[in-house]
Amino acid sequence: MSPTRFVLDCDTGSDDAIAILAAASHPGLEPVAITTVGGNVALADVTANTLSVLGLVGADVPVYSGADRPYLRPDLPIPRDVLNKDSAFQLSRLGFGEPVSTARAEHAVDFLTRFYGDAASADAALVATGPLTNVALALTAEPGLAERIPRLVLMGGAHANGNVTAAAEFNFWADPEAAQVVLTAGIREVVIVPLDATHSAPLSERDCEVFERIGTPAAAGVAMLLRHRLEHDRAAAGSAPVHDPMCVAYLVRPDLFTEQVEASVSVETIGERTLGELLVDTRPWRSEPSNATVALRASTAVYRDFLRTAFAAG
Ligand code: BDR
Ligand code: CA
């Protein structure tokens, strides 16, 4: 069976980096391009991190640098340097050395509109693991694009508590207007992987040890990133959620999610205390039709199996 082709739009970031390593290493996956967006860290660091992670495993995947500020807002709702002021969790650089390659000259938004405008790309999913700025800009520049993206799998939102605020998860909070544009654009199949799913299948020190024993450059890199998450994640107590790789895992392991709902989803763009909140309307009498599948729980066993398959091969 030929590998599943997809474009990854990300804000690398340690869990995005694990998603890239899994994507580049898993025999069932073929990342055709990576587009970068400002999010976890500033765009220049996101792009450098992405290139150095690819360099670690010698993966020849073209990288296109994209938006360095949100869709409408001049900055994140709270600027990044204020938000991350006392946090050792967000590293602006991931420690894999300076990149040995460079990003392509084409802007990520131009790449996305060109790529999905081509009938030969009709099979390629779009996976988004950062703020949805690039995707929203591409859909705005080319409204017909929504019909040409066969499937969007994204990490964002929370049905229960968020992580930046009680209501909002980081990716949706960082660019709520972009998230709202993307969710309501009419893309045929949208799968949302919110915090509810990622927190239900956390990884632990035991996983670090497994990856260290595998010992390939990808597995050793993942062990290092995972250990940093375990040491610095505020919620970690012997285990920590590793959000973004779940989206790429789902492409080859549709059995990853053990509970999911079809819902009419939207994102709060105005609320003083709820900015960036994902609204998941499952009421039988709702007026809007369902526009997404929202994963609520994941299987740790399936997630581990996916990661071990990826890194044993990498
Ligand atoms: C999301 O925000 C970022 O910190 C992570 O990379 C992930 O995409 C989790 O809220
Ligand atoms: Ca991310």
Image (cartoon, rainbow, N blue to C red):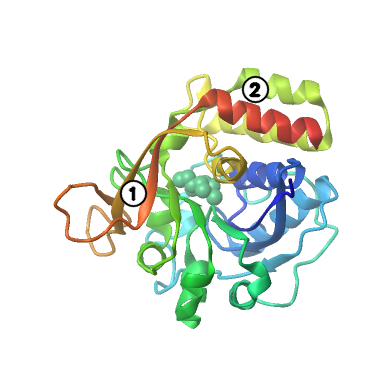
What amino acid type is highlighted by mark number 1? Ala
Observer-nearest of 191 and 16: 191
Q: Is residue 82 above or below residue 1?
A: below
Observer-nearest of 36 and 253: 253
What amino acid type is highlighted by mark number 2? Asp
The quarter of the image holding the N terminus is top right
User: Is residue 210 visible to the viewer in this orientation of the structure?
Assistant: yes
In percent of width and height, residue 149 lies at: 53, 66
Decide if residue 146 is on the left or right side of residue 231: left
In which image quadrant can residue 112 be found? Answer: bottom right
Q: SS for tag 1?
A: loop
Q: Is residue 126 above or below residue 314?
A: below
Q: Residue 168 bears which disc, if any?
A: 1
In three-dimensional space, the C-alpha distance between marks 2 and 1, rounded to whole angstroms, equals 28 Å
Q: Earlier in the sequence, mark 2 or mark 1?
A: 1
| Residue at x 66% of width, y 36% of height | 225
In percent of width and height, residue 23 lies at: 69, 46
Q: Which residue carries the number 2 mark?
A: 207
